[in-house]
Amino acid sequence: MLKRAFAGVFVAADPGRLRLRTSARAVLGIGLAVAAVAAAGLPLTAAIAGGLAALLALFTVADPTVRGQAVTTALLPVVGLPVLALATALHGRPLARDAAFLAVVFCGVAARRRGPRGNALGIFAFMMFFATQFLHAMPGELPRLVAAVLLALAVAAGVRFGVWRIERRSLPPAAAPAPLSAGRGAAHPATRQAVQAVAACGFALAVGQVVSGERWYWAVGTAWWIFVNTASRGETLVRGFRRILGTVCGIAAGLLIAVPLHGAPAPTAALVAACVFGIFYAAPLSYSWMMFFVTLMAGLLYGLLGVLHPGLLALRLEQTVIGALGAALAVTAVLPVTTHAATDAWIRRALHGVRECAAESARRLAGDPAADPAPRVAELEAVLVGLRRSIAPLLHPLSPLRARKSRARQVMVALDDCARQVRGLAEVAADPDASHDARLTAACLRVEAAVGRLVNPAAHPAAEPVAPGAEPHHHPGAERALAHLHGLEAALAGLAAPLYGGARAPLAGA
């Protein structure tokens, strides 16, 4: 089992070696940032704060354009330093500190309505408050911490946009799809999740302080990070389980590796670099593995600070469980969104994406040079990423809902087949000689009708036979396009049974 899990992350396909290059760049950027802070004569606590700032700058900034990434990186200190100053000023004033922390939680999550930039800035603000608790920073240390953060961010930006410009040599990632539902005020998904996060972090803060008046912030950090990149109750519960699993394994590694080192500088620095690489390399594929490296790195840093012992690692596990429990209670009792509701919305968006891909390809095949299905295909791929994340609770090995698990797997297989067919169709549509075939237009219309029947069966009865068109010219490109369209029709037909087999809505009750 462990060998399969390891292979699933570290032997997984890495097109263009993008994960490898991103991870190596992170090690370089964070290492140079820490070295610069140390060379400036700043203390160890400032070096840790600077390393964290550099890590966040390289990990969380995910705007779809290089210019957008640069702007977000420049805004990180604008948002983070006032929070850092507030957190140090409230040291020794627990009630005011706790209230301010929860306010930062709410604002940090609500900022996600602004897209990738809001998400990155919200995370950075939260982590600046968290880091102050982690380092037990006093008000007098603020100038050194500010200097370390600014210097580290400058070095990380220099590596990202100057020394190692991966984004300029690679295709930018597809823009993340918009939230599943739009709304104003409390109806907005980000606002709803902000309320849930405050409830979860409030529970974690209160119970965590009962367990430990010194390390309570671990519980708050756990509750916060469980809400990142989740949209439903099922997603949040699965993420909490994976965080606990990764933490348990990381603590075991800490007992075997970090505790015996006793904070020895050279081997600890090498292992921290390895953990940074592991965090970036594993993050896109496995949250459990990412948390394994985060937990081991935290143990190594505590070793550097001279406070690491086995009891501290056991306390971290206790606080992690408290935070995960807070998140589970919050998504269950506070403005809950079921896995069914989220998954249903993602499936509908995927089907609309398939229809748009087919329609855009049909326009291109009909001779419209302005039609370009490639962006539509990229959007569909992004939607399928969201659907996989949403449907993961149903596919989890511990899920007792075997029938729904089987249906969910069938849905993903059929939609993946749809994505494969539309990718091939888009490639063929780029060939101008494949156009002007009446069979292609008829097949595209049948695809659109099939999607309509899946989205709204009552409003879209079975398709009428299509009248034969003009005698087609049997160009190889047209034949390939027809093959993809027929494959798309078959995949859409295969979706009907798992979506509506004895149910009134896709994956009802999931």
Image: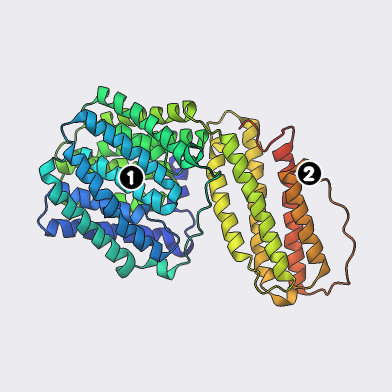
Evaluate if marks 2 and 1 touch, with contact meaning CB atoms under 8 Å apart.
no
The answer to which of 108 and 209 lies nearer the viewer is 108
Going by the numbered disc 1, the residue's amino acid type is Phe
Task: Indicate how the structure is coloured in the image.
Answer: rainbow
Residue 217, image x and y in percent?
27, 34
Q: Is residue 444 above or below residue 435?
A: above
Residue 68, image x and y in percent?
40, 62
Image quarter for residue 421? bottom right
In the shown orientation, is residue 51 left or right of residue 335? left
The residue under the point 73% across, 72% down is: 477
The residue under the point 72% across, 34% down is: 504
Residue 446, image x and y in percent?
79, 56
Q: Earlier in the sequence, mark 2 or mark 1?
A: 1
The residue under the point 25% across, 36% down is: 255
The answer to which of 142 and 47 lies nearer the viewer is 142
The answer to which of 402 and 338 lies nearer the viewer is 338
Residue 95, image x and y in percent?
23, 28
Q: Is residue 33 above or below residue 296?
A: below
The residue under the point 50% across, 54% down is: 176
- Is residue 272 in view from this perspective? no
Q: In what element is the residue under mark 2?
A: helix
Q: Which residue is mark 2?
A: 459
Q: How many marks?
A: 2
Q: Which residue is mark 1?
A: 293
The answer to which of 56 and 399 lies nearer the viewer is 56
Q: In what element is the residue under mark 1?
A: helix
